[in-house]
Amino acid sequence: MLLSKDQNQRNLDRVELVLNYVHSHLDKDLSVDYLSALSGWSRWQLQRVFAAQTGLGVAQYVRELRLSNAAELLVASDARQIDIAFSCGFDSENSFSRSFKQMFTCSPSRYRMRGNRVGLRTPISRSILVPHQEKGHSWHQVRIESSPEISVVGRAGKVNGLFSSQPDFLDSVPKLWSELKSSFTNPKLKPTKDSPFVGVIDTRFSNEPDTYWASIDSHHLSDAQVLGRLTVPAQEYAVIPFKGVLNEFNKVLSWFLLDWLPKSGFEGVSAYDLEIYQADTEKEGGTTQMEYWVPVRPVHSSIRT
């Protein structure tokens, strides 16, 4: 059954009420039963509407957010593991350690020893700047990831980006990708199956235009000598998932820069932005699935809730 515009707006508002409460009370009772009473929905209704609006289960979202806050505290503080567990809503150190390993595939102590932010989920945000995407979602969840140094090979060119006085990226970027893919007719260039494509934008200099690389990880080519090569240093990133028509992504990026980033506890870094495409993701109707990686660094010691 299709919802009316007013009903859909009421659902959005009630989901936002639940999210705001969760974000402010991660150390409190956040069971589905409690949150359903708070929302005025039944347990079944809450889970159904929450999943329809955000693409996530209620309990899954609460658990991943608690564990992400715990991971941030492990990296950015010297608090005891048991104190972190209690402050993030776990009733014992054993249950915390078990859940942490399920999400991050390593123990809390190992994660702390590595000292890198990997796989951290941040609070879901709702944006009026971004049009509804697949399934009507108007919610976005950014991850925090640390990437090691990577080496890419490809084709590079000058591009006027989103905030340029004369943006031309909608024309110039596809041309670079076309040049790269045409190179694969060379028998010396044979990407491995399902090799991810990597767009690299050099934002280190304020002068326009930027340098854009349409590239692939050098380890995925049998012979890359005829292509240009770039080394991207290790860096911490905010990762923005996107699925939709590619020329709509500028609205998502505007939301990230103007809305999410100023409130996040992170700040942008002039380095290399990345676009990660899994193989050739453009589908019927021009729909593209990718992740946009923005270089960031923390401005205070914990993920903002």
Image (tube, rainbow, N blue to C red):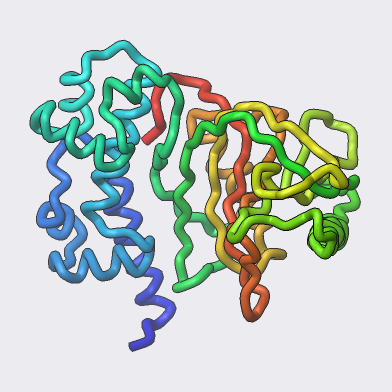
In the rendered image, residue 58, in percent from the top left (x then y), is placed at: 24, 56
> Against 7, is 190 above or below?
above
> Which quadrant is the C terminus positioned in?
top left
Which image quadrant is residue 1 in? bottom left
In the rendered image, residue 153, in percent from the top left (x then y), is placed at: 77, 43
Q: Residue at x 54, y 59 (%)?
A: 128
Q: Is residue 172 left or right of residue 231?
A: right
In the rendered image, residue 205, in percent from the top left (x then y), is placed at: 83, 29
Q: Is residue 82 left or right of residue 175?
A: left
How many marks can you see?
0
Q: Is residue 202 visible?
A: yes
Q: Residue at x 40, y 82 (%)?
A: 4
Q: Residue at x 62, y 54 (%)?
A: 196
68 or 147, nearer to the observer: 147
Q: Is residue 90 left or right of residue 297?
A: left
Which image quadrant is residue 177 in? bottom right
260 or 17, nearer to the observer: 260
Q: Residue at x 38, y 86 (%)?
A: 2
In the rendered image, residue 9, in percent from the top left (x then y), is placed at: 40, 69
Q: Residue furthest bottom?
A: 1
